[in-house]
Amino acid sequence: MPNTFFQFKSFTIHQEQCAMKVTTDASLFGAWIAQQVNDATRLLDVGAGTGLLSLMVAQACKGEIDALEIEASCFKQLSENISASQWSDRIHPQHQDFKTFETEQHYDCIFSNPPFHQDQLATGNKATDLARHEAGLTLESLISKCSSISTSTGKLFLLIPFYRTAEVIAIAQKQGWHEFTRSCVSQSPKHGYFRTMIGFQLHESKAIQESALSIKVEDDAYSPEFMQLLRSYYLAF
């Protein structure tokens, strides 16, 4: 029987009550965000799930993080994971639907690994479909709402399927966001890209920082770039 938890160097993720488990690409995304937000003071995790991204970011910065999760059993697990961590005083789980989330707070960093499947067949499992399919929260509504609760220098980080990259950029531009950084992810140099990690900001950038990253190299070992990003988190490195 596989473990119901994932052990990182500085925290543990229990996940048996959450539809979306810890994944390699989500871990990579958390580390990628973390290296860019060390000066952020107020952050928001939309669709926090197990709390993976919030915990990875909290390890790297000293800001306050609001972590929203809509699904009840997953929110319970999120709260337990946060409570057991050393950053429980700075991460604030909230059982909220982002579509109806009301706040007077303005955030200088918002990040999300959103439900990004669009036309694929649903599984029939309500919790899984809520986590994976955007019927509950479309990218348009996500990005639009982020515009209204961000500071003027706010940043938005998203993990999306590679095939939706151009679509997401177009949606963001209509909402006043400007792309400033992008990293396309492949499983190995032999594979095509399958994820895009992308960052937007509300003021125009002079140049977009573009990069590409393979999780593994040809001999199935983790790539040096992947290991460098995850070195502060993965026990294996």
Image (cartoon, rainbow, N blue to C red):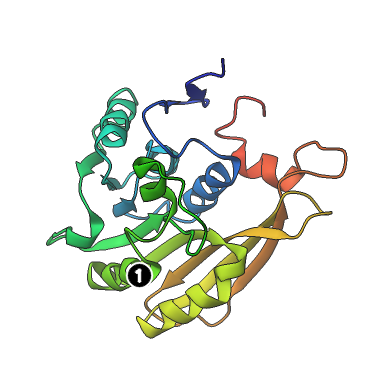
For label 1, the SS is helix
Question: For residue 174, what is the image quadrant?
Answer: bottom left
- Which of these two is toward me, 231 or 15? 15
**Residue 69 location in percent, x, y?**
28, 45
Q: How many labels does the image show?
A: 1
Question: For residue 109, what is the image quadrant?
Answer: bottom left
Kindly identify which residue carries mark 1: 143
Q: In the rendered view, would you say 166 is above or below 154?
A: below
Q: Which amino acid does label 1 sit on?
A: Ile
- Which of these two is toward me, 127 or 225? 127
- Figure quadrant of the N terminus: top right
**Residue 76 location in percent, x, y?**
26, 30
Inspect this view and state whether residue 209 appears: yes
Q: In this view, does 165 lie to the left or right of 18?
A: right
- Count neighbours of disc 1 (C-alpha within 10 A) and say few if under 14, some if 14 to 19, many if 20 or more: many
- Figure quadrant of the C terminus: top right
- Which of these two is toward me, 11 or 70? 70
Residue drawn where x is 36% and y is 49% of the image: 130
**Residue 141 location in percent, x, y?**
31, 70
Q: In this view, does 52 lie to the left or right of 166?
A: left
Inspect this view and state whether residue 113 appears: no
Residue drawn where x is 36% and y is 73% of the image: 140
**Residue 37 location in percent, x, y?**
43, 54
In the image, farthest residue toward the top: 1
- Which of these two is toward me, 121 or 12? 121
Residue drawn where x is 53% and y is 83% of the image: 206
Q: In the rendered view, would you say 48 is above or below 183?
A: above
Q: In this view, does 145 lie to the left or right of 223?
A: left
Q: In the rendered view, would you say 50 is above or below 236?
A: below
Q: In the rendered view, would you say 140 is above or below 191?
A: below
Residue drawn where x is 54% and y is 42% of the image: 27
